[in-house]
Image (tube, rainbow, N blue to C red):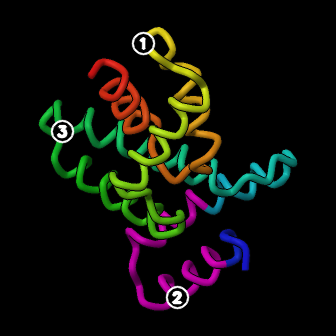
């Protein structure tokens, strides 16, 4: 089953249950997925990662501004989106991928970070956030 189909089913269930906040969030995500499908890109995971990132950034901004109610809503939506994404890599799994990437790209110093990061991101298939990958590669190359 495609992610959009699963979201449609969950949207129907949320509507029947009267979960307004969940219905609103699912509609927004479904709208983005449908728009992307019409454009022919078809990478549902990329759309979900992008939308999750937007929610996390908004949450951070709202918290800094003292708008906890809005920040909580953004956090709820980000958590809802995460439900449809594949599980994130553990730190141990990411460490292994970073080690392999550094070895395969022959990265030796911080200026080689880009090659190693690009390699890890391609191999992990979106199961790790870019900032986590960057931090791990930087940590490994500066140690």
Q: Identify residue for label 2.
A: 13
Q: Which mark is first along the chain, 3 or 1?
A: 3
Q: Which mark is first along the chain, 1 or 2?
A: 2
- The Cα atoms of the two marked residues, 2 and 3, are separated by 31 Å
Q: Quadrant of residue 138?
A: top left
**Is there a contact, CB below 8 Å, between mark 2 and mark 3?**
no
Helix, strand or loop: magenta stretch = helix
Query: With respect to residue 82, does 134 lie above or below?
Result: above
**In the image, which is nearer the foreground, mark 1 or mark 3?**
1
Considering depth in this image, is 116 or 43 the residue closer to the camera? 116
- Mark 2 lies on a secondary structure that is helix
Tag shown at residue 63: 3
Name the residue: 57% across, 64% down: 27
Query: With respect to residue 52, does 143 lie above or below?
Result: above
Q: Quadrant of the C terminus?
A: top left
Span colored in magenta: 6-29
Q: Is residue 139 magenta?
A: no
Residue 30 in the image, given as x and y percentages of width and height: 63, 62
- Mark 3 lies on a secondary structure that is helix
Q: Quadrant of the N terminus?
A: bottom right
Outermost residue toward the top in this view:
111
Residue 139 in the image, given as x and y percentages of width and height: 30, 27
Q: Identify residue for label 1.
A: 109
Name the residue: 62% across, 84% down: 9
Q: Is residue 13 magenta?
A: yes
Name the residue: 79% across, 53% down: 42
Residue 140 in the image, given as x and y percentages of width and height: 34, 28
Pointer 1 local density, CA inside 10 Å: few below 14, some 14–19, many at least 20:
few
Pointer 2 local density, CA inside 10 Å: few below 14, some 14–19, many at least 20:
few
Name the residue: 56% across, 57% down: 28
- Mark 1 lies on a secondary structure that is loop
């Amino acid at each position: 089953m495609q992610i959009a189909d699963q979201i449609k089913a969950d949207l129907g269930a949320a509507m029947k249950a009267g979960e307004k906040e969940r219905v609103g969030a699912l509609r927004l995500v479904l709208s983005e997925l449908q728009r992307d499908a019409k454009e022919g890109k078809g990478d549902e995971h990329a759309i979900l990662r992008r939308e999750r990132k937007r929610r996390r950034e908004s949450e951070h901004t709202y918290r800094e501004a003292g708008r906890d109610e809005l920040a909580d809503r953004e956090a709820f939506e980000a958590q809802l989106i995460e439900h449809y994404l594949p599980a994130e890599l553990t730190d141990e799994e990411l460490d292994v991928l970073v080690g392999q990437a550094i070895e395969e790209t022959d990265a030796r110093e911080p200026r080689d970070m880009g090659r190693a990061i690009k390699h890890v991101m391609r191999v992990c298939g979106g199961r790790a956030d870019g900032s986590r990958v960057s931090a791990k590669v930087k940590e490994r190359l500066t140690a």
